[in-house]
Image: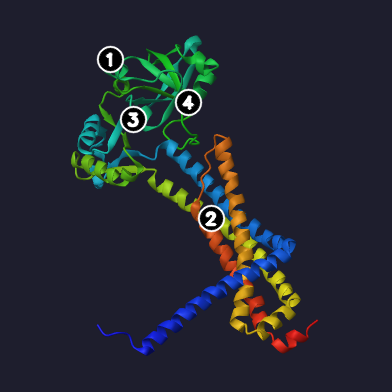
Amino acid sequence: MSPPTDQARQKAFQQTLLSARRTMLLSEILKLALDSFRASKLRFALTALGMVIGTASVILVVTIGLTGKQFILNEIQKIGTNEVEVEYSGAGATGTELAVYNDYLTREDEKAVIARVPSVLYSSPVLETHDRISFGGGVVKDTLVLGVAPQYKDVRNLVVLTGRYLDEEDEAAHIKCAVVTEPFAREMFGSADAAVGQTFQIIGIPFTIVGTFKESVDTFGQTEITDETILIPYSVARYFTGTDSVKQLYFSVRSMEEVPDATREIVRVISSRHKPNSVYKAQNLKELLTTAATISDILTAVLVLVAAVTLAVGGVGIMNIMLANVRSRIREIGIRKALGATSREIKLQFLAEAVIISLTGGIVGSILGLAVPVSIRLFTNFALPVSALSVVIALAAAVVVGVVFGTVPATRAAQMDPVESLKYE
């Protein structure tokens, strides 16, 4: 390998000198900026205050948005995001064949799905009937009665308030028992506690109330459960219909991510067991959950843009102060240029000062913005979400604001004539 030529050595030496000069230039610029801040601490603090408020606002707005999103999704999940409801919606044929038969769902369909769709954890039929319920004292009331399996509680995330829920023994032994909603218990018996142990009759058959329940979240009547609903074992409810057919089957899937695939597979399994022209419709809350998350993200983005206005206002403050700073240091700029400082170096000096002011305010604002949710998490039971991404965005925005609004003052300082600057008093 041949030794390097003199020209190569000279080029390497020049690159080394250039690198050293850049390092010295950067350190000199930072030193001059810090000296300027020390000479005017109050002005520096007041200028950075706008960025403190702006970055803290961005982080707090993101925290509020994430908290709202988390609350909305949790409320929807309480309804049952893993739930899949399959319903017979009629025959696909036309003409007289449409009225020939109703190809309803059966318990055998439920068993087939459980056997062939591994992601299904719980299931229950829902047999709906409206009957006149007789209570003591000759009170008669039209009430919605649902025949369900014990796993219906897990599928629908029901909360037992008093007593107990229907169990496997009730289903197997055809026990005449029931659980009622809290509003129904209060209306008929005064309270949920008083309802347990009371009896009523459906078409002369006596039932005993063993518990009261409610939905885990208020669905405002948008489910099959109303304020006045009675649940009885499915094995008993089918006595009132005389058939094993049901119109609805409910399934609970292992995880929310598996819901779309499980929904398609459930419909495929059920359709394969029935006549080709029968139509079965499956519904789940996956789309509702996705829509709610999207809306929440959009609202958060809008709030962040509003908070970003504060950053812009802080940037205007930085530009105003830096313009005044340039004017008050005209003689200093002239001396530096007379000593050999280039226009580029002068521009970098004042641009660095603007960025340092902005970034310092951004760091302090980020700390204050994070202090609120972290303190709430430490001293209360509320687990507010903390977004590290919001901190990165806020700090990056602070740097951009410093560069954008510091460019005009820095350019004005760099363009000053050294002779005129030295004459300035």
Q: CA distance from mark 3 to mark 2?
A: 50 Å
Q: Which residue is mark 4?
A: 228
Q: Which residue is mark 3?
A: 126
Report the residue at 40% width, 48% height from top: 287
- Pick the residue in front: 328 or 263: 328
Q: Which residue is mark 1?
A: 173
Label 3, secondary structure: give it.
strand
Q: CA distance from mark 3 to mark 1?
A: 19 Å
The image's mark for residue 391 is 2
Q: Amino acid at mark 4?
A: Glu
Label 3, residues with CA under 10 Å away: few <14, some 14-19, many ≥20: many
Label 2, residues with CA under 10 Å away: few <14, some 14-19, many ≥20: many
Depth check, mark 2 against mark 1: the one in front is 2
- Residue 374: x and y in percent read 56, 43
Q: Amino acid at mark 2?
A: Val
The image's mark for residue 380 is none
Residue occupying the far top of the picture = 137
Q: CA distance from mark 2 to mark 1?
A: 61 Å
- Residue 3: x and y in percent read 30, 84
Image position of 392 (left or right of 174):
right
